[in-house]
Image: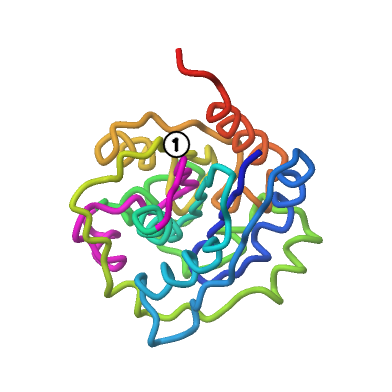
Amino acid sequence: MNTFLLLPGAGSDSWYWHRVAPLLEAAGNSVVAPDLPVDDDSAGFPEYTDVAARAVADVSGRPLIIVGQSMGAFTAVMTAERVPTSMLVLVGAMIPAPGETGGAWWGNTGQEAAQKAYAVEEGRNPEAAFDPFELFLHDVPPDVVEASAEHVRNQSETPFTTAWMGPEWPSIPTKVIAARYDRLFPLPFMQKISRDRLGIEPEIIDSGHLSALAKPHDLAARLLSYASELDSPPR
């Protein structure tokens, strides 16, 4: 079968994948979900990539599928440049452009305007103070929300000053999943940057930003479907 390298987004750890990993393993795959040094001010994307690459250094004999959630897209593509990779999957992702830092990404893509527009569409206050429950956890089961409090990590600003240098997207099959009810990266926004930057029409999952916590079965089904493509003979 396959090995999935699961990379979390900002301020998170490997627990983020705890509802998805068993579903992938039950289908016969192996899962590697490293903790990235998100709270280490000496670590940027190159150091995150070092951790991710080391985590799969001993993996051989199986196709490697790298899955990057949100800011994890930067680490995902940089890891794919370092280790043999069969597929990249970006989920609710900060799809980087060559030379773009994590900090520049927000203004370059127009994320703030998109987030505010979607808040207005939903009848929420677009100028409201940051509320992680409203922005990220609105569709996550209450027991998972409660448990998540123990897995929030202080996100260092260092990655926002570091960049993926490119110069172009690796020639690796790439999938993009956008979330229909994502309040941080609204669906039309994600569709636009996926089309503009990768020429890919994203598939849609009916969740908010944290699809692995809100809809683990739906997300795992998509990942397993993508993995099955690697097993299909050439047409």
Residue 110: x %, y % from top left: 26, 52
Say which residue appears at 46% left-offset and 85% top-offset: 40
Q: On the image, which quarter does residue 29 sit in?
A: top right
Mark 1: which amino acid? Lys
The residue under the point 57% across, 35% down is: 205
In this rendering, is residue 217 above or below 98?
above
Instruction: Provide the residue designation for mark 1.
Output: 175
- Residue drawn at x 34%, y 55% is 81
Of 41 and 191, nearer the camera is: 41
Q: Out of 72 and 50, give the one closest to the viewer.
A: 50
* Residue 76 falls in image quadrant: bottom left
Q: Give the range drawn in magenta.
A: 83-108
Q: Which of 148 and 100 is in front in this view?
A: 100
- Tell me: 21 left or right of 117: right
Label 1's element? Answer: strand
Task: Tell me if residue 102 is in the magenta stretch.
Answer: yes
Q: Which quarter of the image is occupied by the C terminus?
A: top left
Q: Is residue 38 magenta?
A: no
Display colour scheme:
rainbow
Q: Which is nearer the eye, 227 or 40?
A: 227
